[in-house]
Amino acid sequence: MEKQERIAKDAADLAFQARQEILKMTSTAKASHVGSALSVIDILAVLYSGIADVNPQNLNESNRDIVILSKGHAASAIYSVLALKGFFSLDWLAQYCGNGAPLGGHVTSKGVPGVELSTGSLGHGLPYGLGIAFSRKRSSVPGRVFVVMSDGECDEGTTWESALLAHHHELNNLTVIVDRNGIQSLKETEETLKLEPFAEKWRAFGWDVHKIDGHNYQELTNRLTQQSRPTVVIAETTKGKGVSFMENSVLWHYRPPNEDELAKALSEVVDQ
Amino acid sequence: MRDTFVDTLLAEAQKDPSVVLITGDLGFGVLEKFEKALPKQYINAGVAEQAMLGLAAGMASTGKRVFVYSIGNFPTVRALEQIRNDVCYMNNPVVIVSVGAGYSYGSQGYTHHALEDIAVMRALPGMDVLTPADPYETVALTKYLVSTKRPSYLRLGRSGEKQLNSSAPTLKAGELNALLKGNDGSILFTGAIGTLALQAQETLKSNGKNVGVYSVPFLSSLKPESIKEVAAIGPIVTIEEHSTRGGLGSALLELASISGINADIRIMGVSQHNLAEIGDQTFLRTSNGLTVEKIVEKFNF
């Protein structure tokens, strides 16, 4: 229990710093998807604070854990976490989306230590993670595979093709975390293409399903610590979490914060 | 070709446990021996081609040598973005194997005709596109694919293809495979349609024209020198059981243009498939102008 409390505390610290980096990156680069990044950041912070066994030192080990951010538009979130955890220099964040810079607007693994899969087109992370989990299971290689998805991404057919496959092959080393913020590209998910009853869908596909608060570090930590079946954690989140004027708004899927908005957003994050 | 492929892959997989064969629920009467012999190196992913290609890429990223098997368009066009992003962008060494080149599944209809696959696969970065002409070349290319580690596409016919090579050839990446040499021009073909090329060569010979016949098994790695050599002989007629847009003929024209090779290239292929037409492979080849007579005509101007 002591370990889980430490992970949750470290995650809170990491997310606190990462939120500030995300805001600065998207503002400086005039990049989109800040709301998506703020939504998923607590999940990533927990994974990289001791849930997933992956760090800059063990990247070449074949039995370490794997984290795939399938919602590749939340690039600023994974990049800030990886930089803060020492996978690459923090200086890279300042050049986000720049010409000739290492980090682009959608997640790339090219030359970026710690990124497992280049993403940006939705519905690719789960089949890929499934392949790694499957290969490891067949070869009796330990290590878990975590795939972090958006809820809008669950419109994709590959999500449900993969759900069938993971259950059929009993991939107990595969964990899906859905960033369930309820908003997709244009409108709310339920208004766009109904996902509910969402948990029941996964359950019907044979998965172990858990619904939790996706901004609660302790809940995330406890839930992700162990599993015995293919597991989906439906992390209920708020798009734009932590910045009042960005929360639950489609606008911040696209709009970068200007200087004034950045200052206001940063002060809100720091005050929390 | 498909039996030859499976037999060759099975022999290689028995030596190399990293070789894995994934099928998209196809291969009745063809894949059972592989599954029986090496159940741990075999997966039926079900009828889920897009997830299958993502799965294949993920497995390949862990060091497996993954071969994905299905018919024509299913492991290619259906899963195109998975191939583009998860295989090519990530540079994962997945080998996509399609059976049913061109009109091999003739009377099954257009859904089963592979007429655009070369164009699509050839356009992808780093993709090695391989098209064997006969069982001999299938063996050679399958072995080559087990040894190379890059995204690849192997385009197979179906079954009963004749040997066009007189003996097992040594295939070199990027080079043409000469079946016959001539001094009045050359026919370059890809795949089992080479039977027509050889017949046309005989007809031309009886008319006093001696043309060479070359198989082109390496479609994306063609070296300019190999084209330069045949271009110097005389006209080059290309024939393929594929769209004229983006296949062998296009590849040659592009290469000649980019490399500044002065070549008289006359391409033959499916220029406009009649989507309403039903028929077997021979019928559809003929109705699309893929005949011995038409090849001969191409040398008459």
Image: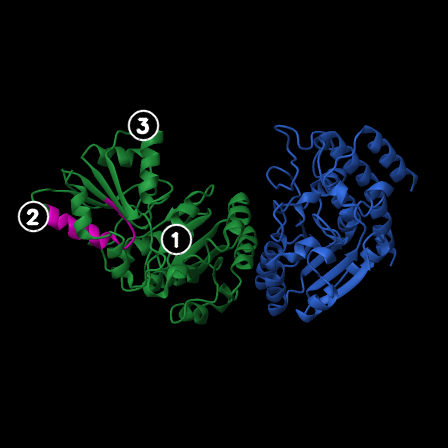
Chain colours: A blue, B green
Q: Secondary structure at mark 1?
A: strand
The circle on residue B260 is: 3
Circle 3: residue type = Gly
Real-space CA distance between mark 3 and mark 2, rounded to the nearest whole angstrom: 34 Å
| Residue B237 percent coordinates (x, y) | 23, 42
Q: Quadrant of residue A265?
A: top right
* C-beta proximity under 8 Å, tags 1 and 3: no
Residue A231 lies in magenta, yes or no? no
Circle 2: residue type = Ser
Q: Which residue is denoted by mark 2 in the rendering? A: B206
> Label 1 lies in what chain?
B
Q: Which residue is denoted by mark 1 in the rendering? A: B154
Check if mark 3 and mark 2 are on a common chain: yes
Give the crowd class for mark 1: few <14, some 14-19, many >=20 residues within 10 Å: many
Real-space CA distance between mark 1 and mark 3, rounded to the nearest whole angstrom: 29 Å
Circle 1: residue type = Leu
Q: How many marks?
A: 3
Magenta stretch bounds: B188-204
| Residue A129 percent coordinates (x, y) | 62, 55
